[in-house]
Amino acid sequence: MEGGYALYTMTKKKEETDLFVPRLVTTEENFAPGHRACIGCGEALAVRHVCKALGRNVIIVNATGCIEVFSSVLPQTSWRVPWIHTIFENVGAVVSGIESAYKARVRKGKIPDKNVKFVGFAGDGGTSDIGLQALSGAMERGHNFLYCCFDNEAYMNCLPSSSLIMTEEGLKRIIELKKGEKVYAFDQKNHELVVKRCEGVFDNGTREIYELRTLHHQIEATPNHPFLVLKRSGRGRENELMWKILSDIRPGDMVVVLKDLGEGEPYKFDPIRKTVVGDYKVTHVNEIELPAGTSPDLMKYLGIYVGDGWTRVKKGEIGFALPEGTEERNALIQLHSDIFGNSIGREDEMYVYINSVNLAKFIDHLGFGSGAKDKTIPGWVFTLPKDEKESFVAGLLLSDGYKTGNSSRYVSASKELLKRLRLLLQTMEYRVGKIHLQRKERGTVCVDRTLLKDAEWGAIAFSKRNAWNTEKYLSQYKYQNFLIESEHFEMEEVKEVRAAGKEPTFDLHVEDAHNFIADGVVVHNTGIQRSSSTPYGAWTTTAPVGKKSIGQATWKKNMPEIAVAHKIPYVATACPSYPFDLMDKVKRGLEIEGPAYVHILSPCPTGWRSPPELTIEIGRLAVETGVFPLYEVINGEYRLSFDFTDLKPVREYMKPQRRFRHLTEDVIEKIQARVEEEYAKLREKAGVK
């Protein structure tokens, strides 16, 4: 159908008739190309067909979900018609409110009546789950609108691009992960730390996110992202862990967090190309011994560098802001001699300078940053032995930290450094407070200097944990901390869940365990969570397959029949594999006075684990097997759009989808019987014999 030159081929009485598409449907694209949908996305195809049928004289209200994500990545949009994004559960309320406001303004003569049509878009989660209440109310009130549910039979959720993931190679941002890398996960059976393979990271666009905060951790995610929480079973019964989406979590809930990453190994550095005499404009090099790997002394030296050092590679300079006569300067001078085998270059009252282009190149390539505001802790530091991590922290405290009793405090102008330091300390069995931010305006005197511009910095406090006497008080402690016996994990109480704006988000899939550690918190695989529209027996990350589970354990909610029960004038089912049927039903729903509901099956290669090139074929098989029959209900009268006296076997529909590959013949036969029974009831309602 590209450019209006494609042909639609129909076979009738063995004669082929070619019809130009422009004669059948407009070539105008109200949903523009260039969106961010996955390859083979049935939902994107369905939206395109629906928008062709709607025309331009419409206002579309769209819930948070896949459509909103892949069509409206700021500052770009695919919408060539008026379009409003609303929160997950509110489409029914917003579209009916806009329709009422429009009618009121027309009635008062404030605007001319241009016969504008009002349309709601949502996925199956925003329709059959969290959005059902608002939709039901809008249908009961009899508002004049069309509601399109794009049913991909699962929730798709994600984490922001700033999320930090614990991997075997160290801490990494979610966008840095590659397929095949090993990430740390939580073994739900043994409560141990395990390593699992990353199966992919997918860009999911800019979305609304929320922040979950405990006393020692904070993490951001979309509202439908699952976290592992404690389910208290009552007196005398064993408590258990369960998955709960972020929007359902409340202050007081207990979530699983990482407390100890275990013992690591010294890190081996990649060799750098040393500058030598004879290189361009190089006549002299200050020879220096560069270490091949980490050691406690080197990590303490680097800790001091992160707090008070800088590099200027082009000038071959490393500097430290350490006043004369201080413990920090004396420690640095001794460490430098022990590690690199030479002495400090020059000193003055406030600074220490080392002139060595190779040392500057070496420190620069380690990834700590060069200036106060861009300093950070590279991911490889998280893989070190505990004594080397402790030495690094000791170096930080020598530079920009101090102790008060059993507690330590570290101050930095780099928010990223503080965030990563907080996570590092949490892997070393420290208790860490939240990041406290402070600000001073230009002109304020700070550290004996007048600030030339506004300054902002932060601080965190931390202390070593006290040992729990589990031998004597195990039952009491276990009530407070269900994972008290775990070496690597513990429970923390949720203090707050709050809106945190919009951010670019990403899906991360992990094999087997289906969970991973993000920002120190155990979270579920992003994407592919069950909804009440997920079919019986299908695998999702929140309806996993196991010895005691076949996947989704309940039958798919019949949303079209729920809409029919509201006695609205028009209800229909559709599928983008049958584009002309889909567009005809959208037009009829738009023309009918009162609420109209169209339920559109939208095959999802990512969630259904199917080849993207088979999207259209899978949609057809859903119809031809009776899994998703196409029909209309006009003022209570049922009409079959396609009738099959002999349905294809359900297994033909399931075969291309890996979400069903675990099902046994007995289960498939059970599903087959259910499909045949429901299809027979539908034919009877339509008066087909």
Image: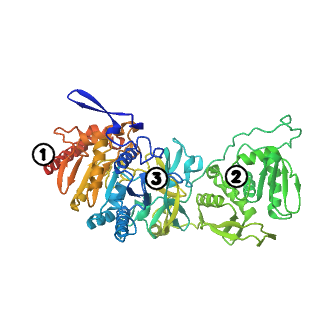
Give the vertical position of 271 relative to 524 (above or below). above
- Residue at 55% x, 60% y: name it: 259
- Along the line of sight, which residue is nearer the eye, 86 or 181? 86
- Along the line of sight, which residue is nearer the eye, 169 or 293? 169
Q: Amino acid at mark 3?
A: Val
What number is the disc on residue 368?
Answer: 2
Label 2 to label 1: alpha-carbon separation: 73 Å
489 lies left or right of 545: right
> In the figure, residue 589 lies in which quadrant?
bottom left
Badge 1 is on which residue?
A: 688
Q: Amino acid at mark 2?
A: Phe
Badge 3 is on which residue?
A: 69
Q: Check disc 3 and report its element: helix, strand or loop.
A: helix
Q: Earlier in the sequence, mark 3 or mark 1?
A: 3
x, y (%) of residue 11? 25, 31
Q: Earlier in the sequence, mark 2 or mark 1?
A: 2
In this rendering, does residue 687 appear at all?
Answer: yes
